[in-house]
Amino acid sequence: MIYAQVTGNVIATHKNRELEGNRLLVIQPIDHRGQATGSSLIALDTVDAGQGDRVLVIDEGGSARILLGNDKAPLRNVVIGVVDDIDIDEELL
């Protein structure tokens, strides 16, 4: 699973037939402090997340397709939750 921040929306004049009717987001993986880690990704939105939201993302195609209920969908990343707060004991890191 990936902890990330939504940085934008994907606007497409043409989508794969299996993804029509679904919204795609640009997400930036972040660490527990909110610092960017790695490259941006595109993820299917299932929770109506918006720009600036911190989210949890499934990063595995089979699970993503099961969640969507479509074995033919060409996707790997799906936003499955909006994170309201994160509390980590820094001494355990």
Image: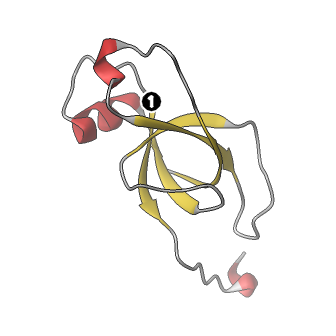
Residue 39 falls left or right of residue 6: right
Which image quadrant: the C terminus?
Answer: bottom right
Q: Which residue sits at x=21%, y=26%?
A: 70
Relative image position of residue 32 (x, y in whole percent): 69, 68
How is this picture coloured? secondary structure
The front one of 89 and 50 is 50
Residue 20 in percent (x, y) is at 33, 24
Q: How many marks?
A: 1
**Badge 1 local density, few (<14 within 10 Å), some, or many (20+)?**
some
Hey, what amino acid is under mark 1? Arg
**Left of 13 or right of it: where is 27?**
right
Q: Nearer the viewer, residue 93 or 3?
A: 3
Q: Which residue is mark 1?
A: 76
Q: Is residue 66 left or right of residue 15?
A: left
Q: Residue at x 19, y 34 (%)?
A: 69
63 and 78: which is toward the camera:
78
Q: Nearer the viewer, residue 42 or 38?
A: 42
In the structure shown, which secondary structural element does the residue marked by tag 1 occupy?
Answer: loop
Q: Tell me if residue 32 comes above or below residue 11 in the rendering.
A: below
Residue extending farthest to the left is 69
Instruction: Residue at 34%, 36% (x, y): give it.
Output: 64
Q: How far from the left and from the top, in percent, is residue 28?
A: 69, 46
Q: Residue at x 53, y 77 (%)?
A: 84
Q: Position of residue 62 (x, y in %)?
A: 32, 30
Rendering quarter of residue 45 = top left
Residue positioned most to the front: 13
